[in-house]
């Protein structure tokens, strides 16, 4: 974990509160990871590996295509101005 110079940050929380939040964050992260593994294992068990991988691949493509990929404008921008 990256150490931050505490002199640069305002004192909003005590060191004890920060340690408690970090500990809870680790516990919640582990619980989420176990839950994701159980759900994925259940899906793989019921559906089989090949269809599940294909569906996840198609879903990943569509997420990339429509959500993450920057869109280009359809109109070309003209740099010349009409002065007439």
Image (tube, helix red, strand yellow):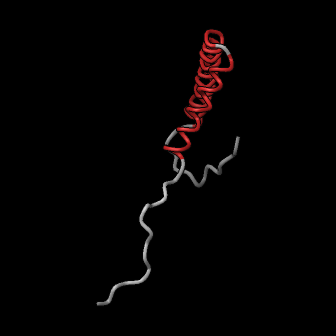
Left or right of residue 73, residue 64 in this image: right
Give x and y (percent) for residue 35.
Answer: 60, 17
Image quarter in which the N terminus is found: top right
Q: Residue at x 49, y 59 (%)?
A: 72
Give x and y (percent) for residue 65.
Answer: 53, 44
52, above or below 62, in the image: above
Give x and y (percent) for residue 29.
Answer: 61, 25
Name the image quarter holding residue 48.
top right
Q: Front-most of 7 and 49? A: 49
Q: Residue at x 32, y 89 (%)?
A: 83
Give x and y (percent) for residue 2.
Answer: 69, 45
| Residue with the most extreme left position | 84
Image quarter in which the C terminus is found: bottom left
78, above or below 6, in the image: below
Name the image quarter holding residue 37.
top right
44, above or below 26, in the image: above
Q: Residue at x 34, y 85 (%)?
A: 82
Q: Front-most of 10 and 50? A: 50
């Amino acid at each position: 974990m990256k150490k931050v110079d505490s002199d640069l940050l305002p004192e909003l929380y005590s060191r004890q509160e920060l340690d408690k939040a970090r500990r809870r964050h680790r516990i919640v992260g582990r619980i989420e990871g176990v839950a994701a593994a159980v759900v994925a294992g259940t899906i793989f068990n019921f559906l089989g590996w090949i269809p599940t991988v294909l569906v996840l691949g198609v879903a990943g493509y569509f997420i990339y295509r429509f959500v993450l990929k920057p869109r280009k404008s359809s109109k070309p921008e003209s740099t010349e101005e009409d002065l007439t």
